[in-house]
Image (cartoon, rainbow, N blue to C red):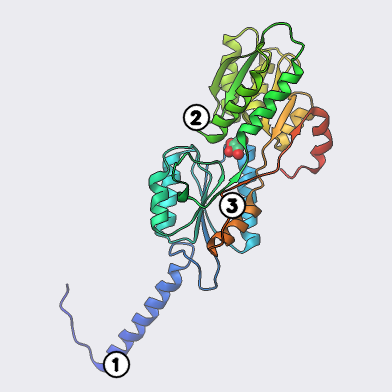
Amino acid sequence: MGKMRTQSAPWRAAAVLASVLLVGGVAACGNSDTGGGGTKDDGKITMGFSQVGAESGWRTANTTSIKEAAAEAGIELKFDDAQQKQENQIKAIRNYIQQKVDVIAFSPVVESGWDTVLKEAKDADIPVILTDRSVDSADKSLYKTFLGSDFVKEGKLAGEWLVEQKKTASGPVNIVELQGNTGAAPANDRKKGFGEAIAANPNLKIIASQPGDFTRAGGKQVMEQFLKANPKIDVLFAHNDDMGLGALEAITAAGKVPGKDITIITVDAVKDGMQALADGKFNFIAECSPLLGPQLMDLAKKVHAGEEVPPRIETEETTFTTEQAKEALPNRKY
Ligand code: GZL
């Protein structure tokens, strides 16, 4: 500790004034966007949000919905894009805990490996809301609620449509499957729902299934491999539109007609996917709504106020055929 020097009266008054201003300044800074967090003096809620990434049209629409809804709700949003890496999400959540935000919300890129950081948020008395994707934590007290879709149902609807379409098939119907990123709830659950549904018709066989990471590039690359390795492919089931759109390029390059030589079923129903469906390049889409922002902000306010909320809130969704896509396209919000 440096030697403390006494000061004359005028200097001492100036030093006191300076220290008061400094403390006031730091306090003001502490509530700014750079840190400090917590409910702002004006009672504004601060939310820390960790997003999976920007891998698909669905994700882009989801991010837009969250940012617009936060602004609309007057919620201070701290937003992080994890580039599809769990370690980046864990880092972001720890930053939000340090900043003492009022609420943490995130879309877990994979189902497992969250208990430790969620326990840290719970110990810091910061409520957590899961949105879009869930986690496999046995301890349900680690988060307040889950807001999103029933991915098993989406896969089931896709499979049931195919069973109906192929009910008169006399021989094997070869299916290839483009999965979402390994370990992701939508990948695990869509695969489960689809597989259970097509079991109704033993002619329907999944001959190849690989992750395409929910991206167009991934869908194209894996579909190229499928086409090289399998001379007879009758159906593609892609866990999202973007992988299906990437696969279209590979199918066309292989001299096959998408939607005719190969039946294509996807999930999401984002605009580009709906256009492909309307054009007959896709044959069926199970919708998965990204427009979770307004509900998320309502939940954040309730959770912050200490109100009870349901443990799981599922979004309303439907399915589309080519004709239905033509009708729906003009009014699609995403
Ligand atoms: C589903 C969401 C999935 C979308 C993909 O809720 O997690 O991730 O289906 C997105 O398009 O990449």
The residue labelled by disc 1 is: 10
From the top left corner, tell me how far across and down residue 83 is, in percent: 50, 40
Are the residues flagged by discs 3 and 2 in contact, CB closer than 8 Å? Answer: no
What is the residue that sits farthest to the bottom in this orientation?
9
Task: Measuring from the top left, give residue 91's x and y in whole percent.
Answer: 41, 48
Residue 96 to residue 164: above or below: below
Left-right relation of 211 to 164: left
The Cα–Cα distance between marks 3 and 2, rounded to whole angstroms, is: 29 Å
Asked whether the beta carbons under mark 2 and mark 1 sit within 8 Å of each other, the answer is no
SS state under label 3: loop
* Viewer can see residue 319: yes
Mark closer to the observer (3, 2): 3
Please tell me which of labels 2 and 1 falls first in the chain.
1
Look at the picture and state if 321 lies above or below 99: above
Q: Residue at x 44, y 41 (%)?
A: 138
Q: In the rendered structure, which amino acid carries the disc numbered 1?
A: Pro
Which percent across, then down, holds residue 183?
49, 32
Q: Image quarter for residue 333?
A: top right
Q: Earlier in the sequence, mark 3 or mark 2?
A: 2
Q: Position of residue 301 (x, y in %)?
A: 58, 61
281 and 322: which is toward the camera: 322
* Disc 1 to disc 3: CB gap under 8 Å: no
Q: Amino acid at mark 2?
A: Thr
Task: Tell me the element at label 1.
Answer: helix
Q: Amino acid at mark 3?
A: Pro
Residue at numbered disc 3: 310
| Label ID, residue 182 | 2
Above or below 22: residue 331: above
Image quarter (top left, top right, bottom left or bottom right) of the C terminus: top right
